[in-house]
Image (spheres, coloured by chain):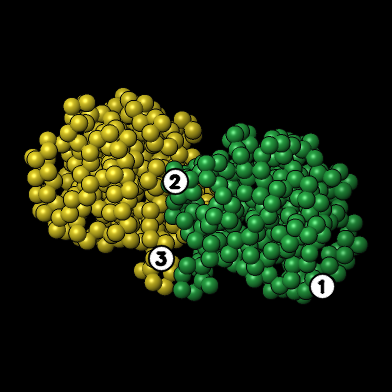
Chain colours: A yellow, B green
Amino acid sequence: MLTLDAITAAARRIEGKVHRTPLMTSETLDGLCGARLFFKAENLQKGGAFKARGATNAVFSLSEAEAARGVVTHSSGNHGAALARAARLRGAVAWIVMPTNAPAAKRAAVERQGGRVVECEPTIEAREAAAAQLLGRTGATMIHPYNDLAVMAGQGTLALEMIEDAPDLDLILCQVGGGGLLSGVATAAKGMKPGIRVVGVEPAGADDAQRSFRSGRLEPLGKPDTIADGLSASLGALPFAEIRQSADDIVTVSDVAIIAAMRRMWEVLKIVVEPSGAVAYAAAADGQVDVRGLRVGVVITGGNLDLDRLPWSANGL
Amino acid sequence: MLTLDAITAAARRIEGKVHRTPLMTSETLDGLCGARLFFKAENLQKGGAFKARGATNAVFSLSEAEAARGVVTHSSGNHGAALARAARLRGAVAWIVMPTNAPAAKRAAVERQGGRVVECEPTIEAREAAAAQLLGRTGATMIHPYNDLAVMAGQGTLALEMIEDAPDLDLILCQVGGGGLLSGVATAAKGMKPGIRVVGVEPAGADDAQRSFRSGRLEPLGKPDTIADGLSASLGALPFAEIRQSADDIVTVSDVAIIAAMRRMWEVLKIVVEPSGAVAYAAAADGQVDVRGLRVGVVITGGNLDLDRLPWSANGL
């Protein structure tokens, strides 16, 4: 079970190894929502995404003997590069299992951090087999992108900083995909401030977390259909157990609302936000959560995307 | 004449009315240049540009009687909206003379801040005539976008913050268009740290500042031809006098280098930078200034641009 103590220990462990990101405000966006918004800008995090937090906590939680045998993960996204970076900082080897059809930019990001890419066919079975074979051969430790308590604790450090910088928050809006981030944020926030509300937000085209939260059992994702590719993972069992305990609700937003929110963030906040990164703000901007009169922490998860394929350009969608 | 005292007084005057913007760093961009770079992110300033500094200092330097009669400027860019905002904060009227062909977004930005737009034909003569008529009728004070000592002092506050946050800088790279910013930055930097170098950077397609700096007399701009529209103003006489005294050199960069620098800043720093905002970094990235081994302050002037017309998209250039 995830605890506030584990998250505060994670914060000490990763201090100086990841950025303490700014909490940004905008009178313009406040005016549009009728609320005070505090944006946690994890797009400005090392590697351009919050994933640095969890990966770094997981790698630096290993014993010396474990670290010497290295770490393994499967990820076609930001977690792979974040794990490679954390392993490099610790002087450990990181093997990243990636499908053969992963974008070249994602693969390059892993390799820039010294990670060793292990290719597999683009199926879940091939991925699991490749990871299992590596683990058997090397004795390395598997660091799952989100179904891992040390990763979840690391992601939760984001909420500690948010509440330290804005102690009077009434509500936090936080993305949910695999659930590593939301489980950490909800546990940290409720531990520090029992009266705060924490609402998860996911794309309507990948709504397994909402369905699972409402039915009380892990529902299958099906085939995700959303521009927010960072949130198309299936909710994990470990995060789900924490989210059931600590989150107040989960809402969904449409891709149209996500793109509109993303564009407004670029225009007003002057920062580069990927579609997944705009999902929490979209819930406020599109009225899926009533934020009027509240002080609201809004998570921006990341800013990694292809600038040649912006969703509002002719060739984007 | 501009002095460090005037700039420190400006800093006190505008404190709390404009943002103290962050000084951003990136290991990736450092590695590409072989230098330590410190980016002053004025794209995150109020209104998305450094112009808030000079306009706010100018308006709050007025006497009560002057402020009661209002302010006037001509600007088709960020200064107009910045002056309107400063006037609103002071409870004063701002008339902004804008050409009939100004982009609707620029006009809307002025009006959102409560500025009164006065239209004129898109010629320098019509603009001067409209401003002169307004000044005669109202007794208001003209606040020129850059040829004004209070504006120049306000812009210089950017360098005070930069050097406070990174005291060991060897060099500052700073855009030059009309010269208000560079004159303030060079005066502040040399006043605080006589050994520091300050180099102005302008687009090759609007190189009047470089030619003026080298010949020692104000050279005409001719017809500017650059994507960096924020730097297509003619160097002003008052800024030029300070730049001759305090700047060490002025270099130029190509539009190709500007666009490449801008895109890399979006990708790595995850912030929205307009073409003019990328010009100082372009000089380092493109090798127009040898920064290897140095600690370099790099000014990012602003982040206001049309997201539908990015220079790397098919319809951009």
Task: Check disc 2 and report the residue beneath it.
Answer: B31
How far across and down, in percent of the image, does residue A149 sit? 23, 34
Label 1 SS: helix
Asked whether the viewer can see residue B33, the reply is yes
- Which of marks 1 and 2 precedes in the sequence? 2
Tag 2, which secondary structure?
helix
Residue B126 is tagged as 1
**Relative height, residue B190 to residue B261 (above, below):** above
- How many neighbours does mark 3 have within 10 angstroms: few (below 14), some (14-19), or many (20 or more)? few
Residue that appears at 44% across and 46% down: B31
The residue at which mark 3 appears reads as: A308
User: Is the residue marked by circle 2 packed among few (<14), some (14-19), or many (20+) residues within 10 Å?
Assistant: few
Q: CA distance from mark 3 to mark 2?
A: 24 Å
The disc labelled 2 sits on which kind of residue?
Gly
User: Which quadrant of the view contains residue B60?
Assistant: top right
Question: Residue at point 63% right, 36% down?
Answer: B163
> Which chain hosts label 1?
B
**In the rendering, which numbered label is found on residue B202?**
none
Q: What is the distance, in whole Å, between disc 3 and disc 1 at their CAs?
A: 41 Å
Mark 1 surroundings: few (<14), some (14-19) or many (≥20) residues within 10 A: some
Please name the residue shown 27% across and 37% down the image. A87
Vertical side of B304 occupied by A109: above or below: above
Q: Chain of mark 3?
A: A
Residue at 43 percent across and 69 percent down: it is A313
SS label for mark 3: loop
Q: Nearer the viewer, mark 3 or mark 1?
A: 3
Q: Nearer the viewer, mark 3 or mark 2?
A: 2
Provide the chain ID for the residue under circle 2.
B
